[in-house]
Image (tube, helix red, strand yellow):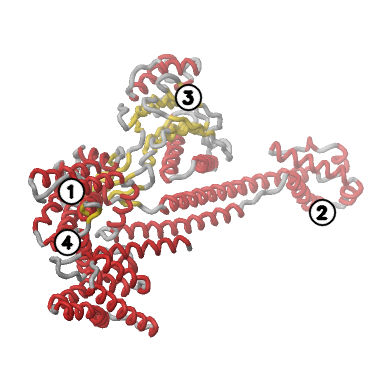
Amino acid sequence: MQQAKVLSVLKYIFFFFLLFTLSCAKIGNTFSPFAFGLYFALIWSGQKFYFLAPLYITASLLADFNDITIISSLVAVVASSLIFALHSKLEKPINLPLFCVYAFVSGLGGVLAEYFINAEIFLPLLSLIASIIFCLAGKEILSILLVRGLLYKLNLVEIISALSILCALFCGLSNLEIFGLSVFKLFASFVVLISSSVFNMSTTLLVSCVMGLGDMLASASALSLAPLVIWALVVSCFRTQKRVFRAVAIIGVEIVLGFYLNLYGVYGLHSLLPVVISAIAYVALPKKLLEKIRNFCNLSSSTMAMRNVVNRSRESLCKRLLELGEVFGEMDYVFRSMIKSGMTKGEVKNFLAGEVREKICASCPERHTCHRQCVEETYSVFDNLINSALERGKTSLLEVPPFLTTRCSRVSSIVATVNQLCLQYRNYAGVLSNIDASRVLIAEQLSGVSKIMKDLAGEVKRNVSFDCGREEAIISELSYNNIVCSDVVVYEQNADVVSATLIVRKNDSEKQKIVEVVSDVCKHEMAVVSVESSKIAGWNVITMKTAPRFDAVFGTASCPKATSRVSGDCYSIIRISEDKFLLALCDGMGSGEKAEKTSSLAIGLVENFYKAGFDNDIILSSINKLLSLNRDEIFSALDVCVIDTRLGVCDFIKMGAPQSFLKHKERMEEVSGGALPLGIVQEVSPMIVKKVISNGDFIFMFTDGISDSFQSEDALADFLNNQTSLNPQTLAESLIEKALHLSGGAKDDMTVIVAKIFSTSGGGM
């Protein structure tokens, strides 16, 4: 509440400044139509007339205290107050024709005062008509600022209205001085500098001309226009440079115009001081504030509608993704609730014993003796038979104690029935286990999809922050370098990542200068993500993004087992996102075509899961279940490394794979894992080891055919550490050759992946 009051007070102080400045604005030093027009426009826009009335009278009298001013301002205030009070009481709106009539009636006091005091009628009437026209222009702009807001592109009438108010304001400022300093120069030079940061060159020139026109109306001299036009032209030449260059440029131009060209006539340091003060204030302006001014002034640009649509579409997409995430989450819950826990071992034995009694003992004449008088001994025999059949797969007559064989004539039937029931139960339990495993697998996938949806919603939720200033600077700088760029969109995804999309002439799209210019303007090291053909012939669309800290190059080498035609090892090196690489190495059980088929299946699943964006735990658990559900025994050692080039880290995930090595400039790091290979057990708990990478590091991954060739892990580490080559392909081939030499030939499949990490910001390869 207190803040609202402060803002209201500041608003009316600003209105007073405008009214006073426009009261000082006189065309040809004869008549001043602007203050009355603004006052009437403010009331028409819904501002409180009982606050504006005293402000208008005070501003008018301070600007020109005489009888005519007193009469005209009082009549205008009284007439307008009565009119608006009456309409407010009757709750009747004021349409445009009535507004013009009311404005004319309210301004007649000044016309009559001029007539009776100075015997003038023509100029006062002309001033009143000009006031009404200016009032209409003021109403257009006030409706934008106070009612509609700067959400849409200004139409031609609104642009003309805004320029007319700007012209009137600077007409008034040209008649003001503070301590002998020109207020006009102080504000005009500052506005030129701000315009050069906010608008393009043509708009800056237009604003300067309008301000110069205001000074020309007050001074009746065309020379008033020249300095501002020259300021705008020179300052615009430094639009892509730092602010200080523009500040120095406008001071330099003012010195040349004043001291050397004698454009102003009498000129001294006091004449230069307003421009110097403006330049210093402009340089000292906080960057965030200048950015807000730029965004505010570019809200009405032609591309704003498109950018609003982009952010609104992102909000809608975020909502849909969250809803889909919830749907998949519910489906995950449903599938998990369908999983049957099964019976305990004791419950199974009781159930099977009951089935045996029902099938064999129910029709036996001696059942009462066995199941009443000797119940504990009989139940113990059944329990042992069933337990033996469940554990060993089959029981026999040798398991039946003598006391039962001597009195029971159906012992053979009991043993046969126990074996049959246990076999049926094992088959049923296997089917049930597979069904439950399938449900768990589906539930995990649904959970993974749900998480992906929600993560995507989080990424989309953030509004895209467009940067119009950088866009114009890129176009100007590329043009200076003879590169034709028709359009640019620059936006920030977050504080660290900037993206830029350029429409560039096809002949220029391969020029390295484009990357240099965009990097310089965006203050980020940029990298080209894609170059695509535009729908318009002769143009390409270049997409760029802040370059990650690191990049990587790779080398691979492999050798099949001496007795096999095909290697059972498979590997993959793919980019799973703009900032991440996946290195995967899979060693299928055995060697030859069967092992190759197994490892190919596993590596294909790894690639697709990672590209889809699933988490490590879900990926490995799902692949493990898929392999374990296969009728054939499929085991695979899996070695995965995910390199995040933006964060500068890598994750090692090992499932039965040998150790890997991370070679730094001064030391070696061994990465080991203890998890079982894929497909052996249904539940897996992979070990994930995170390591920090730096410029010049090497990553070595290999199958056990390599590691088993060396006498020890230390011997392997020493060999890698003593390698001097910087080429990853050469290193991979050297490791294969050394392993073959040590083992006397390929006794197992051998595969090596070597990755070299290098900095993208000058570290080089």
Residue for badge 4:
214
Compared across the picture, whether 670 is left or right of 376 comes to left
- Secondary structure under tag 1 reads helix
Counting residues from the start of the chain, the first of labels 3 and 1 encountered is: 1
Residue for badge 3:
704
- Locate residue 587, reporting x and y percent: 46, 30
Give the Cα distance between marks 3 and 1.
Answer: 84 Å
Residue for badge 1:
271
- Locate residue 376, reporting x and y percent: 87, 44
Counting residues from the start of the chain, the first of labels 2 and 1 encountered is: 1
Give the Cα distance between marks 4 and 3.
Answer: 84 Å
Give the Cα distance between marks 3 and 2.
Answer: 61 Å
Give the Cα distance between marks 4 and 2.
Answer: 116 Å
Residue for badge 2:
362
**Split into 4 quadrants, where in the image is the C terminus?**
top left
Q: Is residue 661 above or below residue 527?
A: above
Q: Quadrant of residue 219?
A: bottom left
For discs 2 and 1, the disc positioned in front in the rendered view: 1
Compared across the picture, whether 39 is left or right of 665 comes to left
Residue type, mark 3 in image: Asp
**Residue at 49% from the left image edge and 15% from the top image edge:** 711
Q: Is residue 764 above or below residue 717?
A: below
Q: Quadrant of residue 753?
A: top left
Compared across the picture, whether 277 is left or right of 640 comes to left
Residue type, mark 2 in image: Ala
Residue type, mark 4 in image: Gly
Name of the residue lying farthest toward the right: 373
For discs 4 and 2, the disc positioned in front in the rendered view: 4
- Locate residue 543, reporting x and y percent: 27, 46
Counting residues from the start of the chain, the first of labels 4 and 2 encountered is: 4
